[in-house]
């Protein structure tokens, strides 16, 4: 049986297309008879399209006792050949393989997400010896308690705690937040995260399979196991159809004693239109989705989406742009206005590599333009901020620890402005001039302008919206209040998002996860439907998702949801029509008014209707 299954899998889609083209030409030759042949040309279609169906049916029955639509088709094929109706057999085989190909073309199984995630795993580590020297060893050889050194730009090899040095670490792999976090002695660091600015020493606490990046890989690998595949309606009904077809054929023969009528019953019972009902509608809906910026990667993703009643969102890069902007600049010195403070801070940050510093410069240029004050003696203070001389003034810009280390005392106005900014979920940069507290800049992530309308449209469709973010509670609440989300979960690590989706789905809800980061990959895989931001999203997130939003236009999400529901309505109408046509054809076959070839042509009419009806989805628009 294993060899037989290998034969069935040979060649893939290219083989199927070639076989279908040859079979279609052979059927035309069988009808038109343009030149004489020693055999009916329909046998080409029977061999190329029919034999694989027969083998699939045999393998399914023998190995798993699995009765699918191919069992019924096989019965119709054998019956047609037995009575010499070769064209009918070839035609049925051709239509069934065409439906199978349409379904196969909607499925994208090849994913390299796990491989890309594995590539993020650090390969080496700098282990310190007792004399202060270091040696580079494979990361898997690091042991708990080892002291390591991590240089700027390197990926942290294991989980541990900083013992010396100040740094800024990009934790996007774990939290999804694009801004680096300032860390110092006593702070924990995770494997797979990136050290950006300062060298530091650390003690290893979790290594090998216990490290954060390895846990992430296991989460992504296991998440898919919790998402059952939808069984096609044709296969779901196949057992009952097979029983009904056999019963009708036997009863017809017992009553009429005419084998031709029994065979005709089997032929017209063949669910050609039934099998085409789903894949044609899915293909048309995928075409519509593509026009609206969605790349559907899984064949049954739209069918799943139609059942969704809860939509969970990541924050940074999904509901926001993931790029901070200056929301306010406040001076607490009477002789220094807000605009002057803004210009001095932007000048000091001009040479900074920190994303917050770059954001200050970008926003100042967008709002004011022109030349910045002259800067000398610039230096970065890892994990703290920057120091520079600007227009002859000694300027510090960074966190509170930077100002305290330099002996700068706060003032009431500065503390109040900083507290207000932090309460609003902003990141605050404190500024000091010549040893005096001068003011602060509040930076916030920018909400996508169409996010609010999108969430309102989802709510009108009966979908609950939930924010799952690795950011702190204040920033999460600001986004939630600004957009009107139904629920909020802050400080979520990848396993927390996965757990929330598991709990929600175990309560009977169907969850759609929308995200963009590596940390969202497990949740995207586990959710009933995963939608990744294709523009700003990581490759790993895109490959873990069922659907990718190519241009990041989240305002199109309500259209996609409505399209999926419309697609299911179309499929149900297709099924109702095809089954109704089948029963009518059976009644005519039992009474002897329908021959096998005419019965196959009736199936053609049903298949054409299904295809044309499904094609209406290509131009469908949400009202």
Image (cartoon, rainbow, N blue to C red):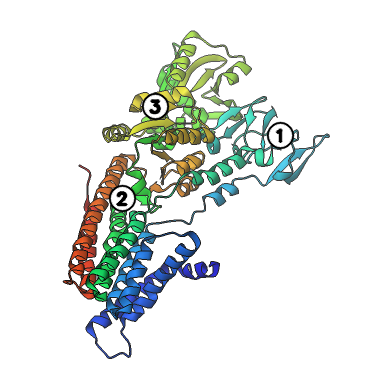
Q: Position of residue 83 (x, y in %)?
A: 29, 79
Residue at 71% over, 36% down = 149
Most extreme residue toward the left is 593
- Asked if residue 502 lies left or right of residue 18, the reply is right
User: Which one is nearer the viewer's eye here, 269 or 351?
Assistant: 269
| Label 3 element class | strand
Distance from Cα at disc 3 to Cα at disc 1 = 37 Å
Going from N to C along the chain, the mark reached first, 3 or 1, is 1
Going from N to C along the chain, the mark reached first, 2 or 3, is 2
Most extreme residue toward the top is 412
Location of residue 480 (image quadrant) = top left
Whether residue 157 is visible, yes or no, is no
Of tags 3 and 1, the one toward the viewer is 3
Confirm or deny contact between disc 2 and disc 1 (CB under 8 A): no
Residue at 40% over, 24% down = 478
Where is the C terminus found, in terms of image quarters? Answer: top left
Distance from Cα at disc 2 to Cα at disc 1 = 48 Å
Location of residue 212 (image quadrant) = top right
The residue tagged 2 is 289
User: Which one is nearer the viewer's eye here, 126 or 432?
Assistant: 126
Q: Position of residue 81 (x, y in %)?
A: 33, 78
* As drawn, 73 above or below 258: above
Of tags 2 and 3, the one toward the viewer is 3
Q: Position of residue 384 (x, y in %)?
A: 59, 25
Q: Position of residue 553 (x, y in %)?
A: 33, 42
- Asked if residue 163 lies left or right of residue 516, the reply is right
The residue tagged 1 is 204
The residue tagged 3 is 487
């Amino acid at each position: 049986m294993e060899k037989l299954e290998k034969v069935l899998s040979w060649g893939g889609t290219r083989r199927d297309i070639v076989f279908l083209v040859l079979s279609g030409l052979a059927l035309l030759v069988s009808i038109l008879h343009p030149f004489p042949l020693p055999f009916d040309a329909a046998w080409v279609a029977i061999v190329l399209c029919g034999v694989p169906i027969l083998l699939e049916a045999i393998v399914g029955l023998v190995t798993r006792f699995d009765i699918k639509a191919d069992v019924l088709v096989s019965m119709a094929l054998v019956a047609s050949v037995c009575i010499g109706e070769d064209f009918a057999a070839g035609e049925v085989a051709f239509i069934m393989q065409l439906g199978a190909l349409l379904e196969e073309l909607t499925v994208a199984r090849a994913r390299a997400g796990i491989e890309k995630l594995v590539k993020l795993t650090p390969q080496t580590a700098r282990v310190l010896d007792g004399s202060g020297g270091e040696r580079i060893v494979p990361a898997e050889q690091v042991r708990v308690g080892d002291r390591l050194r991590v240089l700027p730009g390197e990926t942290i090899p294991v989980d541990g705690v900083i013992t010396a040095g100040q740094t800024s670490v990009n934790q996007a792999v774990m939290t999804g937040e694009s801004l680096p976090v300032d860390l110092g002695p006593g702070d924990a660091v995770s494997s797979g995260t990136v050290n950006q600015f300062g060298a530091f020493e650390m003690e290893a606490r979790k290594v090998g399979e216990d490290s954060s990046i390895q846990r992430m890989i296991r989460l992504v690998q296991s998440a898919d196991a919790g998402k059952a595949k939808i069984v096609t309606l044709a296969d779901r009904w196949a057992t009952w159809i097979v029983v009904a077809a056999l019963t009708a054929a036997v009863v017809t023969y017992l009553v009429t004693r005419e084998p031709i009528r029994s065979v005709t019953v089997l032929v017209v019972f063949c669910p050609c239109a039934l099998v085409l009902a789903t894949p044609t509608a899915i293909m048309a809906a995928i075409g519509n989705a593509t026009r609206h910026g969605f790349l559907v990667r899984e064949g049954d993703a739209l069918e799943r989406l139609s059942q969704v009643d809860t939509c969970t969102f990541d924050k940074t890069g999904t509901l926001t742009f993931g790029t901070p902007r200056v929301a306010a600049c406040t001076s607490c010195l009477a002789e220094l206005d807000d605009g002057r403070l803004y210009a001095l801070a932007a000048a000091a940050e001009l040479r900074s590599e920190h994303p917050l510093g770059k954001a200050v410069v970008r926003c100042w240029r967008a709002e004011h333009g022109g030349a910045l004050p002259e800067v000398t003696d610039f230096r970065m203070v890892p994990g703290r901020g920057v120091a520079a001389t600007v227009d002859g003034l000694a300027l510090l810009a960074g966190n509170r620890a930077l100002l305290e280390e330099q002996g700068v005392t706060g003032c009431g106005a500065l503390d109040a402005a900083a507290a207000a900014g932090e309460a609003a979920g902003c990141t605050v940069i404190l500024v000091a001039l010549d040893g005096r507290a001068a003011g602060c800049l509040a930076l916030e992530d920018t909400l996508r302008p169409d996010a609010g309308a999108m969430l309102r449209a989802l709510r009108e469709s009966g979908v609950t919206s939930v924010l799952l973010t690795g950011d702190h509670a204040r920033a999460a609440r600001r986004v939630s209040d600004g957009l009107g989300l139904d629920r909020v979960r802050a400080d979520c690590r990848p396993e927390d998002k996965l757990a929330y989706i598991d709990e929600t789905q175990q309560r009977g809800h169907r969850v759609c996860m929308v995200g963009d980061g590596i940390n969202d990959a497990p949740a995207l895989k586990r959710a009933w439907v995963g939608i990744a931001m294709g523009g700003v999203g990581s490759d790993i997130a895109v490959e873990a998702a069922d659907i990718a939003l190519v241009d990041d236009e989240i305002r199109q999400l309500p259209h996609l949801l409505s399209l999926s529901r419309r697609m299911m309505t179309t499929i149900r109408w297709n099924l109702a029509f095809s089954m109704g046509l089948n029963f009518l054809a059976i009644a005519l076959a039992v009474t002897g008014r329908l021959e096998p070839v005419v019965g196959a042509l009736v199936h053609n009419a049903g298949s054409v209707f299904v295809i044309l009806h499904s094609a209406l989805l290509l131009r469908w628009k949400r009202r």
